[in-house]
Image: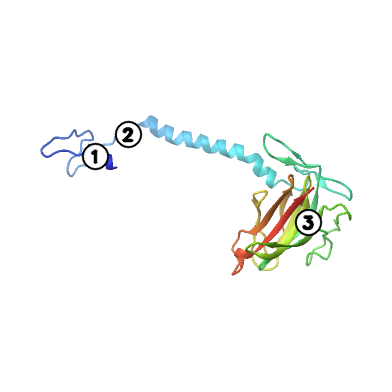
Amino acid sequence: MFHHSFWYTSKEGEEFENQDGIEVGVFPKHNDDMRLEVAWTVLPFILIIYLTYISWAPLDAVWTSADGGNHGYECGLSESSNNQIDLDTGIITSECYHILEITGKQWVWSFNCNPNEDSWTGDTVPDRGFELGTNLCDVGTIAIEGYGMQPLLSLKAGETYLAVMQSEDVTHSPWVQILGVKEDVLPSHQTTLWLPMHDVSESMILCTEYCGDAHSLMSAGLSVHN
């Protein structure tokens, strides 16, 4: 702009080339280019279709069905998910999955590694407990800087978990940082979220749906171990 302000400034008495045929009181003529307009419409459309196509597989992997999807069937006692990762797509597939419960309430996450018929009010969920000594799932507490003492969920690398979730009050949304996934947790309604654990790591679970005064402090630790 600085360059053009001086370079394209006409001098007093100098006639400029009126390429657009500008006249006082007359609407300027159009310098349209049909090829450019078609290209500007068609090429973005093709780009959007392509981006939709390449994003379909990872989206399907995140919200795949619990019935014969990428993660097989529900694991029985002593069964392992045996996770496998496709290095080309990054999609993790499993032979079977384990179920755990996540409950959101103002302003804390609670986890249940051993779902049973007493876990949900008004619902009957078959006992899907983990065999003792397999360290597939454990719940404790951890001190997180800036957050204080928070719940700690410990899961095993190489295993896939289906989190069955609900809220006791308002809408919450757990964001599992290590996986980059999140799902709304609604009052009086169950939602699910796949947690395919592949690498050993330490991470956090935060709430990404505003849920009241202490929303910013609603967190939990996540430890993935061998």
In this view, the residue in front, 117 or 88, is 88
Query: CA–CA distance between discs 3 and 1?
Result: 68 Å
Say which residue appears at 67% left-offset and 34% top-offset.
88
Helix, strand or loop under label 1:
loop
Q: CA distance from mark 1 to mark 2?
A: 12 Å
Nearest to N terminus: mark 3 or mark 1: 1
Residue 28, disc: 1
Amino acid identity at mark 3: Leu
| Residue 205 image point, x, y percent | 67, 57
Q: Residues within 10 Å of mark 3 (few under 14, many from 20)?
A: many
Which disc number belongs to residue 100? 3
Name which residue lies at 86% across and 58% down: 127
Residue 170 in sight from this viewpoint: yes
Local SS, label 2: loop
**Quadrant of the rendered structure where residue 61 is?**
top right
The image position of residue 74, as x and y in percent, is: 82, 49
- Dot placed on the residue nearer the N-terminal end, 3 or 2: 2
Of marks 3 and 1, the one in the foreground: 3
Around disc 1, counting alpha carbons within 10 Å, would you say few (fewer than 14), some (14 to 19), or many (20 or more)? Answer: few
Instruction: Please provide percent x and percent y for residue 90.
Output: 68, 39
Task: From the image, tell me which residue sits under label 2.
Answer: 32
From this viewpoint, is residue 103 visible?
no
